Structure formats: structure tokens, C-alpha cells
Amino acid sequence: MTITNYFINIRMQRSVAVRFYLNDMPVWRFLRQGPDSMNGGANEWLVPGENVLTMEIVESALTLPNKPADHPMIQVAIFKAKEGDATHQDVEVIHQVRFPDLWDEVSEELKVFPYRHESRFVLPASEVYRPRYLDAPEQDIPSDGTPELRQVVQDLYAAIQSGDGSRFADLLTLQFEEYERANGGAPDTDIASQRTVVDNFFAHPIVVEDLEMDRLVFESRANGRLVHVIRDDGQPVFQAVATDDPTEHLEGNALLTFSDGQWRAV
């Protein structure tokens, strides 16, 4: 199987707060406030066949002066490089969504926030890897989690707090494996390279924000095959920064799936 490299580009204007999901996997693992942008590989979130892009627009200041047509408040594009072309600009757009353009066909009574929008596109099974979480059992997940789910989060935090990069990387083994497979073993996506990134961060002295378990929300995604652990205030669950170089930092939420008989980070 030859993996095709797909990419995602997100551009957000100011006064917009959004979460993005591809197939119910968080593209950004915590709430983002515009202005912001993202451009990078999308393979880890894609599936063979029908794909679903979800935007959860928490709030938006639509009273701002109208933007030019080429500057929407939110624009999301899934694309790949055209065959035989080497330039990043010359791409084939597979799917695109723009806001507030998407409201052109939405009734007035539905134009309220928070607003959820879904769109769909299809990818060939020969070009993208089938992620393992699709084979996990569907489960009912309470918003405050289960003892097993809460323990995984506490284990991740303990590794960060103790500065144990090796332990932290071990807990992310499934995530590393899935990322390498999704990208077809492209440079810097292999497990060793991913562990090196972790090792380099933990080589610094770090300060870690407290884990506030009572603020955590365990979101059921993909019919309970995934659990996205977030904070009720939109801030990252895990936050750490290097005291000798503030540009080196760790921020993220937990995404968990049931694999090999236990809940694991993915």
C-alpha cells in the first residue's frame, strides 16, 4: 500500500473560537481562539472511504465589518500535492469549508452559537491507512470518566511532573505507532524520531502546571471508541515549560482509545 500525503490548512480571523475534528478525532486538542492558523499533515486523522470534518464554533463576532470574500472568518482546506508537482503552492484541494459562507443555506433560527457544522468527503481506501481506533468497541463514557480513564490521565501527568521522558514516551507508544503508519514511514515520523523529540524536551529543567482533575471533562467521540479529555475552561490539560528556554513547552489534552485490553493514549 502506498500512502498518499494529505495536508490540512486552517485560517481563522480574530474573534472566533473553534474546535476542529476529523472523523471525531481532534485536529487541535484544545479550544483555539483566533487569529490563528495551521498548516501540516492530515493523514493521522483520515480514514478510507467517507471522512467527516466537524467545526464546533463556540463563539464568533459577526458584528465585525464585513471581510473581503477572499478573507473568510474561518477557512479549512484538505489538499494534496498534484502528481508530479514539487511546489507546495501547486496543490489539489480535496475539500474546503468557509465560514460564514456556509450559512448561505442555513435558516436564520439555526444561526446561533455554539454552532456545529459537518461536511463530508471521500478518500480511496488505497491511499490512507485505517486507524486502529475504528476497531475499538463502542462504549458509554460518563463525562467525569471512569477509574481506568482517570488513571491513564494521572499516569501521563505523573511522567511529566517527574520529568521522566522515557516513561512519558512509553505511555505514548500507540500514538507513535499510529502516526508512523498513517504517514507511510515518511522522514521524522518513525517511532525513534518521535521519542527523540520527547527526550529533547525533557532534557530541559521544566515547570509543570497542576493537574486539576475536577476540571476535566471526558468527551465521548466516535461513539465511545475515543475519549477526548479536555478542561472545562478550554485550557490544555497538560502544560509544562522549560525554565531555561520558554520557547520549549508542552501543551496538550489526552486522546484515549481502548486497545489491547486497556485504555491507551492515541
Image (cartoon, rainbow, N blue to C red):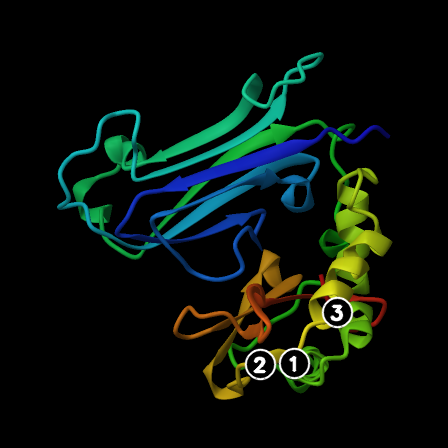
Q: Are marks 1 and 2 in contact (CB under 8 Å)?
A: yes
Residue 176 in picture, x, y percent from top left: 78, 56
Quote the CA–CA distance across marks 3 and 1. Answer: 14 Å
Can you give x and y, in whole percent of width and height, for residue 226 in the image? 64, 62
Q: Which residue is mark 1?
A: 157
Name the element at disc 2. Answer: strand
Residue marked by disc 3: 264
Which residue lies at the image location 26% right of the left edge and 25% below the top edge?
69
Instruction: Give the CA distance from mark 3 to mark 2.
Output: 22 Å
Q: Secondary structure at mark 1?
A: helix
- The image quadrant where one finds the C terminus is bottom right
Q: Is residue 126 left or right of residue 94?
A: right
Residue neighbourhood size for the residue with mark 1, other residues' Cα within 10 Å, grouped as few (<14), some (14–19), many (≥20): many
**Viewer-closest of 244 and 238:** 244
As displayed, is residue 136 above or below residue 88? below
Up/down of 248 relative to 232, above or below: above
